[in-house]
Image (cartoon, grey):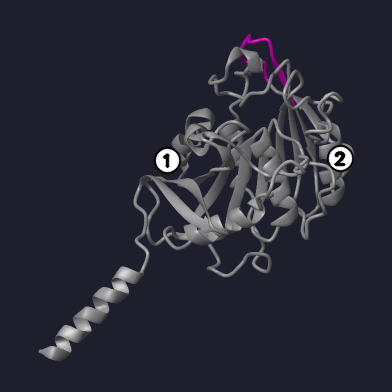
Amino acid sequence: MSTLIVLAGLQSAIMAAEPVRLGPGDTVRELNIDGSTRSYLVHVPPICKPADRAPVVLAFHGAGMNAALMPYFSGLSSKADQAGFVVVYPNGTGLGPFLTFNSGGVDWSLVKKQPDDVAFVARVLDDLATVVPVDPRRIYATGISNGGMMCYRLAAEMSDRIAAIAPVAGTMAPGQTKPHRPVPVLHFHGTEDGLVPYDGPDPRFSKLLTFESVERTIATWVAWNGCRTKPLREDLPDAVDDGTTVTREIYRADQGADVILISIHGGGHTWPGRDTSKPILGRVTRDICATDLIWDFFRGHRLQCDSAPPGGTGDE
């Protein structure tokens, strides 16, 4: 009897040590990083089966926002419930709910310690894999503004884990290094964006925050991905009379790492298809739904077996 009691105690201890798999819905996870508490919100769809390795979409908020706002702002949790992917909304750092990510391009001389948000995202992915069956070949990143800029940094510095990115209204920071492998890019940008201007930052503020123009960002990734320099250009249907029109330029790559630019002519600093912004941020186009296009783009890309970290093949 005593042996049975000991074995039962050992089994209970093992079960207690094992992380609990997350069920459907929203959960906030906290991590201790260098003595500081960081957090992220994870949304697990109801159709995500425990035995399946799910694709993951990292969704980064803009400056002055936080993770809790992104499901409403982007509509990604609703899309995840339809399509069966997991959404992760990391929180940046800052004061109260007004958070930012270290996407590069910021003068940190006035800040005591520069947050390493690339390392933070790596920890988030490692932690997520303990509570959700993750497909390491299908991890993607999207985000708006400062969050879109963070996508470019991850693509450059974590190309071994990020299969594709889809920045919205956020360009790359100067000085980023070439990724170890080509990373497919889908970029959305309004030509009348007043916060992250299409043609690059206002010279009056360039000393505080620097970022590349849309043209230079796209040209850089076209070169890095080995794409053809002449794009396939098309005007998308002007389905709604909202003061905007949309064009798509596709820079093809032989290995599939295409770079696609969707320009919203007359569009502001907004998420296409989501009328959740303040009028001061500019027009929101109704001609396209960025959330739908982003998932359609992501599901067509995955890391090759020799690029993905350990954790399973993710074959469907």
- Residue 11 is left or right of residue 62, and the answer is left
Q: Is the C-beta separation of discs 1 and 2 under 8 Å?
A: no
Q: Main secondary structure of the magenta part?
A: loop
Up-down: is 118 above or below 295? Answer: below
Q: Is residue 118 left or right of residue 78?
A: right
Residue in the image at 83% along x and 36% along y: 212
Report if residue 112 is visible in the image: yes
The label number, if any, that marks residue 81 in the structure image: 1
Quarter of the picture holding the N terminus = bottom left
Instruction: Answer few, some or many: residues within 10 Å of disc 2's Cα (few below 14, many 20 plus, some between 14 and 19).
Output: some
Q: Residue at x 62, y 46 (%)?
A: 141
Q: Considering depth in this image, is 106 or 197 the residue closer to the camera?
A: 106
Residue 228 position within the rendered picture, expressed as x and y whole percent measured from the top left: 87, 44
What label does residue 219 carry, if any? Answer: 2
Amino acid residing under circle 2: Ala
Spatial CA distance of label 1 from label 2 is 35 Å
What range of the chain is rendered magenta? 237-247
Is the residue marked by circle 1 packed among few (<14), some (14-19), or many (20+) residues within 10 Å? some
Q: Amino acid at mark 1?
A: Asp
